[in-house]
Image: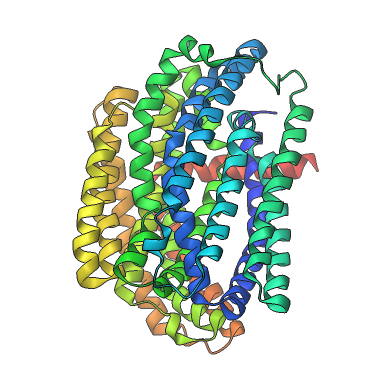
Amino acid sequence: MSRVSKSIKNAKVGAFFFILSIFVQFFSRKIFLDFLGDEFIGLTSTLRSILGFLNLAELGIGTAIGYALYRPVFDKNHIEINKVIALLGVMYKKIGFFIFGAGVLISLFFPFWFDDVDFSLGLVYFVFLSFLTSTLLSYFINYHMTLLEADQKGYVVQIYFQSLNILRLLLQAALAYYLQSYYAWIIMEVIFSTFFSIILRIKVKQEYPWLIIKSKETANIIKSYPDVIKKVKQLFIHKMGAFVKDGTDNILVFILVSLESVAYFGNYMLIFNQLTSLVKITFAGTGAGIGNLVAENNKKNISKVFWEMMALQFFIAGFLSLAIYYLISPFVVLWLEDEKYILDKAIILLMIANFFISIVRSPVQHFQNAYGLFSDTWAPAVEILINLVISFICGKIWGIFGIMLGTFTSLSIIVIFWKPYFLYSKGFNISVWQYWKRFIPLMTVFIISAFAVDFIFIEFINQTATNIFQWCLNGILLSLVILFVYGLSMYIISKGFRDFCIRASKLILNKIEKT
């Protein structure tokens, strides 16, 4: 199966499960909020974020191993693949034991951190240790899935993960509705995590019968891969930056605002996370495909693919951002049937800005990973400092808005300005001006299109949505407007977008001719 074919298959599977799971996600969260309460959902979100901090111990090993696998996967070197996976197993087991010990140690502070919540400490510990158990399974049992992702077979992981995740949510919703039991809800997390780990282990063996599942390699193998260890050390700081951006918001909202506000904030973030997941799943095989592309070292093809990806991600980010701006708050009211869950428009604008940046950054990030460019460890350190300082200061003054402002400021400085320079100077080895000459027109087209869409929406589309049918109708009309205004503008201005449209149309026509 070709690189493009694998990417298309990943996209098909991702889109299918997104459509299936999004209804289950929103349906189940509504039941969880109604029958388990805002504070319990806030508690689980906060504890997941604490576990996210512990997962920093992973040090970016998975990304470094993925980088190390691109060449042997491309060459079909089974011996080297087995060695790299054995290295991953040895390192992950060490990290797993560390996370377990650190988790137990951190939990000793729970009586101080959660002294004013309405739940017993026994429940808090039960939730945390259950989440910890689910996390540890990825280190001890199903770490082999890294090979599937490096081989552009992420769809295999998604099929089983999403299927079990949907079933878990439905069972948890039923238990919440009929029993209102916190403990039953949590037990489902552990049971389904265990099922997923076992099933994935079996599937990996079927896909790669030559893979040594239980390697006898010891810690000495680490010495054979000094380059991987070097990348791991560099990636640790990058992982820290990613965690501060994505994982500390719930903790900061809990500390600076309230546990209940974590649930309110989480309702909106569920929508943003679902859309981000859709984009990531759709392009799940892209990282490995870019790794193979860089391994071929065709400069002209690398540049062409990069700008096709940039244009496509810009279009996706712009389309979704504009749609979210007009539709998200009416949806929250219809979904949760209470206006108390609506956040201020200023907060939503910053959420959208952060979401937009997180989407358009992915081509630069994928190519950096493919080139193994992780040496700019100062960049995430600065990003962390800017994010936390602004979030703490402004969060105390403006609450959630201030916390979002910290994230936006740090992303703007590091992701928008520094990362492209680093890729172009160290990876592509050409002037970064070549980047800005094509990036600025893309940004200009989006801004102009946003004003045009705003005018059309206000003047010609009914902005009220008293029922889900009216909301859907507004969404369809808005989508058509965005597609026409923004899509046409992108096609006229961006060569990368035209190249992608031509490539996609050829693939579709070939598919039709074959059928």
Residue 117 or residue 93, whichever sits in front:
117
Left or right of 500: which side holds 234? left
Left or right of 333: which side holds 393? left
Residue 40 or residue 244, whichever sits in front:
40
Quadrant containing the N terminus is: top right
Q: Position of residue 84 (x, y in %)?
A: 57, 18
- Residue found at x 69% / y 41%: 197
How many marks do you count on the picture?
0
Q: Position of residue 424 (x, y in %)?
A: 30, 29
- Residue found at x 78% / y 39%: 514
357 over 456 or under it: above or below: above
Where is residue 234, by image quadrant?
Answer: top left
444 over 426 or under it: above or below: below
Residue 162 visible at all = no
Quadrant containing the C terminus is: top right
- Residue found at x 45% / y 40%: 308
Where is residue 196, by image quadrant?
Answer: top right
Residue 399 visible at all = yes
Instruction: State the colouring used for the structure image.
Output: rainbow
Q: Position of residue 136 (x, y in %)?
A: 58, 41
Residue 515 or residue 231, whichever sits in front:
231
Farthest residue toward the bottom?
Answer: 466
Left or right of 218: which side holds 192? right
Where is residue 368, by image quadrant?
Answer: top left
Q: Position of residue 17 (x, y in %)?
A: 67, 55
Residue 38 or residue 490, whichever sits in front:
38
